Amino acid sequence: MIEWSYARIAAHRGGGRLAPENTLAGIDAGARFGHRMIEFDVKLSRDGQPFLLHDDTLDRTSNAWGVAGCLDWLQLKRVDAGSWFGRDFDGEPLPLLSEVAERCRRYGMEANIEIKPTTGLDVETGAAVARAAQTLWQGMKAPLLSSFSPQALAAARCAVPELPRGLLMDRWREDWRQQARSLECVSLHLNHRLLTPDRITAIKREGLRILAYTVNSPHRARELLRLGVDTLCTDRIDIIGPDFGS
C-alpha cells in the first residue's frame, strides 16, 4: 500500500459552503474551522499565471464573463470573485497559486491541487501547475495533484515526477487500473456515489489510496471512512470537521 499521510478531511474549494469558492477568504474560513487540508482548482491565465478558478468561464463565480484563460492576469486581477456569494465578500479577488501557497504555509495546511485546464490546454496547464507547485511548496508537505484530464496528469508527471498524483473520476470506468498505472498515480479521487464496498476493496487491492468527493452527509462520511476511504472532500466544513471520525 502506498504511504499516505494526508488529512482525513479536506475542505472543498477552500471554504466549502461558507465562503466563495477558490478564494483566499474561503481558505481563511477553512482555517477558522481548524481544517488541515484544502482542495482547490487551478488553471492558467493567457500569459501563463496559475490562478484559482473552477469553470472555464468567469460567469458563474464572478462579476465578469467569458473564458478566463483568454485574459491576461492584469485583467483577471481586477475581477470580483466574492460578491456573487454575499455582500461580506464584495471585492474578493481571484487568487494566484502563489498566494494560496503562502496561506498554506501560514496555516500549516496540506493541499490537493486540482489541475483544471481551460479547454484544449491540458498539457500546458499540467506541466506549468506542477512546476509552480514544486517551487511554491518548498519546505512544506508536497501537494497532491489531481485532474480529470489524463493528459494534464501525464504532463505533470513528465514535468515533476516526484509530486504525487491522483486521477479524478466522476463516472466509473473499467480501465481505472490501467489509467492509474500509466500515470503512476497514488490515488483515485471519486464521486462518492460511485463507491461501493466491492469497488473500495478492489482499489485498495491495487495499492491505491481513495479520496471521495463531495461528501456532505455525516452519515455517509462515517460509512466511507469505515469502509477504508482515506480522505473525504466536503462542503460542510462546519459539521464534518478536521477530526471527524477519529
Image: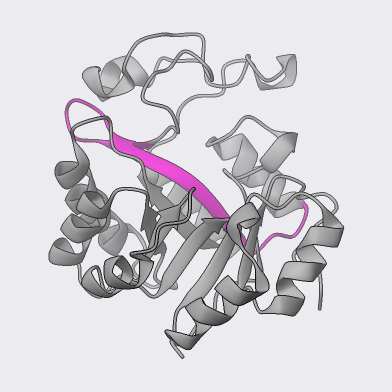
Residue 151 as seen in the image, left or right of residue 110: left
- Residue 172: x percent and y percent? 47, 55
In this picture, which residue range is highlighted in magenta?
33-51
Looking at the image, can residue 243 be seen?
A: no
Residue at x-position 68% and y-position 42%: 16
Q: Residue at x 25, y 30 (%)?
A: 119
Taking the spot 61% from the left edge, 63% from the top edge, the residue there is 195
- Residue 142 as seen in the image, left or right of residue 33: left
Tell me where residue 193 appears, x and y as whole percent.
64, 53
Residue at image position (28%, 71%) is: 178
Relative to 201, residue 97 above or below? above
Quadrant of residue 179 in the image?
Answer: bottom left
Measured as percent of width and height from the top left, residue 241 is found at 79, 60
| Residue 77 seen in render | yes
- Does 72 appear above or below 226? above
Task: Place residue 173 in its image quadrant.
Answer: bottom left
